[in-house]
């Protein structure tokens, strides 16, 4: 099968990112207040609950999940941060830290960009970028 045939069959733009959290309501508020996500749908997925959040403009949805049995969330080392373009990195860093995020890097200027990396209240890394 050629690349053209595959492109006709598959959309390669990300549809969603799924992360497991301890407190769904806290995470909904965090991602809504800090990055403009809005709740679209709640799903009972059997062993866990899902909340689908839509971005304020365009891009992939964020799916927040919580295990019903209360198991601990293990942060493995195989996943990098989810990245978001924002208009003002410093303002969003301030907003996130006031809501429980932990700074990991920056904000710093790098290669024509203003960037910062934070960990959300559950430890998921978020990379913020603004074009200079």
Image (cartoon, rainbow, N blue to C red):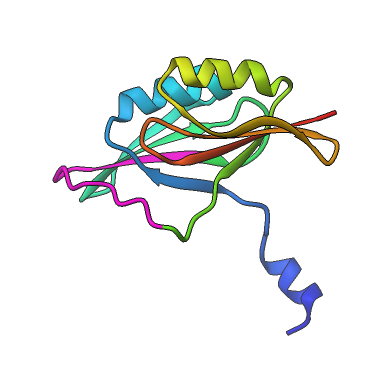
Name the residue located 18 percent from the left edge and 47 percent from the top edge. 71
Name the residue located 58 percent from the left edge and 22 percent from the top edge. 93
Relative horizontal placement of residue 88, taking residue 45 as reference (left or right): right
Foreground residue among 58 and 106: 106
Query: Can residue 36 be spotted in the picture?
Result: no
Foreground residue among 74 and 17: 74
Q: Which residues are magenta?
A: 62-76
Name the residue located 46 percent from the left edge and 14 percent from the top edge. 98
Q: Looking at the rendering, which quadrant does residue 87 occupy?
A: top right
Q: Main secondary structure of the magenta part?
A: loop
Q: Position of residue 5 (x, y in %)?
A: 76, 75
Q: Position of residue 106 (x, y in %)?
A: 63, 31
Q: How many badges with numbers are in the image?
A: 0
Q: Is residue 40 above or below residue 73?
A: above
Q: Position of residue 10 (x, y in %)?
A: 66, 65
Q: Residue furthest left?
A: 69
Name the residue located 64 percent from the left edge and 15 percent from the top edge. 91
Foreground residue among 118 and 28: 118
Query: Can residue 104 be spotted in the picture?
Result: yes
User: The N terminus lies in which quarter of the figure?
Assistant: bottom right
Q: Is residue 49 magenta?
A: no
Q: Is residue 44 above or below residue 11?
A: above
Foreground residue among 70 and 59: 70
């Amino acid at each position: 099968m050629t690349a053209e045939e595959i492109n006709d069959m598959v959309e390669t733009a990300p549809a969603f990112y799924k992360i497991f959290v301890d407190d769904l309501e806290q995470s909904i508020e965090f991602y809504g207040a800090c990055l403009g996500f809005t709740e679209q749908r709640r799903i009972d997925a059997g062993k866990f609950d899902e909340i689908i959040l839509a971005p304020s403009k365009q891009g992939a949805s964020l799916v927040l999940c919580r295990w019903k049995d209360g198991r601990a969330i293990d942060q493995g080392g195989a996943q990098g941060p989810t990245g978001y373009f924002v208009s003002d990195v410093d303002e969003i860093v301030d907003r996130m830290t006031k809501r429980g995020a932990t700074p990991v890097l920056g904000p710093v200027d790098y290669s024509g960009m203003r960037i910062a990396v934070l960990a959300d209240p559950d430890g998921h890394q978020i990379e913020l970028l603004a074009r200079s």
